[in-house]
Amino acid sequence: MSSVAESSAAGDPVTGVSGGGDRDEGASPIENIDWGLAATVGKRIARPGPRVTRYTADRARAELADAAVRAEAPVREVTGLADGLAVPTAQILDRSGWIDAAARSMPAMLSDEGLVAQQPEIKPHGTGVTGKIAGAQAGGLLAFLSSAILGQYDPFSLDPETGEPGVLMLVAPNIIAVERQLRVDPSDFRLWVCLHEVTHRVQFSANPWLTDYMRSNIGALTGDEDESVTDLVSRVTGALRSDKPREKGVIGLMQLLQSPEQYEAFERVLVLGTLLEGHADHVMDAVGPAQVPTVAAIRAAFDQRRSAPKNPLQRLIRALIGMDAKMAQYIRGKAFVDHVVDRVGMDLFNTVWTSAETMPRMTEIDEPDQWIERVLS
């Protein structure tokens, strides 16, 4: 679901690529992608990872696997979300492995069958010319993201080893690349990344309703609309002429292009992502001093990297797939969690995980006292 990344967080944008006349009736855009082709294209054009010796690569994989286990106890202690489940084994992947995993997870995210076991083969889903074109486009996006994702928790798949819900993934070459670029202690940085991803695992495993809540809203967001092009143009024109305030950037664009129902689902997904990422960042820093001796230096270097200027192509890609909006999720979400925990403590903050009704609203993310008043008073 979510991820820490070189240039963004992420974990995981939902890519809906619409097609033409050979699309399956009633299927969402994401279901009309040939994911097998997407994986093939993505692996073919993905950039190679940093050069490392076999010893360095093996040591990094072993250390990441160990760090993912060691992160569980402090995360459960700080969050108070001790789910009682056995500590799962993380999947340590290279870029090609992550592309394959993402190509399996995307259709599983919208499956009506519930959680889906990971299979060796990747089902194509999309068919015909439209599915191939969409698959090639999705492959380009997967290739770009494969060099940015550090870690990811996928709540929509079953762990192939345990059969339990959720798969925790860490992309070793990307973690090595970033720790080198930031010039931070490798062992500390690897544990710091694991703290973030393990927090996501605990969030979902301790609150299983979150998976269906996310799936249903993503389904509403990416589902087919009967609206004609003429109706869409008319609605967008009317919105542009209206005095009603709109958000800026990518979010404002979504507000224009989506139907009211889709935009409501988009807001719910955005708020949930903001909460999940902000909570994970809060936990990273709360756990950090006791577990990661150089956490202050890592946080400073990582935040500086997040805010560093990007070249024009990177800025274009980030704008197209909403990475800057994703970056704001970390900052706004962490500020929300920091404020609420500081005021009422972690036990009362955990009321947020009770149901959809206790989730913060969009306006409450920047005004956390409003959430405290509405939910805790």
Image (cartoon, grey):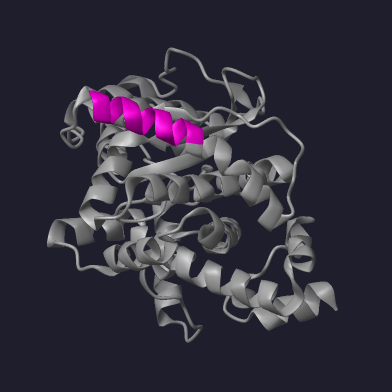
Q: Which residues are magenta?
A: 55-66
Query: As rendered, which of 119 and 80 lies closer to the eye?
Result: 80
Which x, y percent locates residue 153?
A: 52, 39
Question: In this picture, is 281 found above or below 75?
Answer: below
Q: Residue at x 53, y 53 (%)?
A: 291
Residue 57 falls within the magenta-colored stretch:
yes
Question: In this picture, is 293 found above or below 45?
Answer: below
Query: As rendered, which of 100 and 253 lies closer to the eye?
Result: 100
Which x, y percent locates residue 61?
A: 37, 29
- Left/right placement of residue 181 relative to residue 150 reads left
Residue 261 appearing in the image? no
Q: Residue at x 55, y 58 (%)?
A: 290
Residue 162 falls within the magenta-colored stretch:
no
Residue 181 appearing in the image? yes
Which x, y percent locates residue 111?
A: 59, 29
Residue 268 appears in which quarter of the rendering?
bottom right
